[in-house]
Image: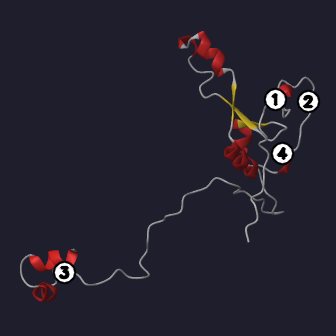
Amino acid sequence: MVVSRLLSTGPSLTARLLSGTISTARPAMLQVQGVQIQPARTRVYYSRTMGKPRTVRAVIKRFFRLNNGQWIRTQAGRAKRLWKKEPRQQARLKQHLCLNATQCRKLDKMVNRRWKEKSFHVDDPYEPYHKLERIPHYSYKPPKFLP
């Protein structure tokens, strides 16, 4: 299609090749290409002295891990401009959100072993949520080995 368009318009193809209006040079094999790798937020921190995995502090600040392996977080904007929000919306903002299995696996990679251990506190407000009843199991499952 491109060749027929080149041949059908204007002077002959050889005349245009000699004049330099058509480039026959191919792109170099070693030509620098744009970055095509998407950034990933998985485990990126290791200690320099021991080489052990370190915890991403932003995960600990924003999320809470239940004993069943599920992660929860608070609603965004739960303490902002409460005077202009309806009481029903204020009640909804006090509730926590559960993360899906993919997000839980990613957060498990971003924290070390200490944060994955079960924790027991006196008068824990999250006690009913630590159990596996009616909550799908969100613990980390390693990928299947495919030979």
Sooner in the amino-acid sequence: mark 3 or mark 2:
3
Q: In which quarter of the image is the N terminus?
A: bottom left
- Helix, strand or loop for disc 1: helix
Residue to which mark 2 is pinned: 121
Sooner in the amino-acid sequence: mark 2 or mark 4:
4
Q: In this figure, what is the number of numbered marks?
A: 4
Q: How far across and how far down the image is residue 10, in percent?
A: 6, 77
Cα separation between marks 1 and 3: 70 Å
Q: Can you say whether 46 is above or below 78 in the image?
A: below
Q: Can you say whether 75 is above or below 90 in the image?
A: below
Q: How far across and how far down the image is residue 129, in percent?
A: 81, 29
Cα separation between marks 3 and 2: 76 Å
Sooner in the amino-acid sequence: mark 3 or mark 4:
3
Residue to which mark 3 is pinned: 22
- Helix, strand or loop for disc 4: helix
Task: Answer left or right for 137 relative to 82.
Answer: right
Sooner in the amino-acid sequence: mark 1 or mark 3:
3
Which one is in front in this view, the residue at disc 4 or the one at disc 1?
A: 1
Residue to which mark 1 is pinned: 129
The residue lying at 81 percent from left, 51 percent from top is 112
Which one is in front in this view, the residue at disc 3 or the one at disc 2?
A: 3
Label 2: few (<14), some (14–19) or many (≥20) C-alpha neighbours in 10 Å: few
For the residues bearing labels 2 and 1, Cβ distance under 8 angstroms: no
Sooner in the amino-acid sequence: mark 4 or mark 1:
4
Q: Quadrant of the C terminus?
A: bottom right
Q: Identity of the amino acid at label 2? A: His
Using the image, tell me which numbered label, if any, was put on residue 116.
4
Viewer-side residue, 98 vs 4: 4
Cα separation between marks 2 and 4: 15 Å
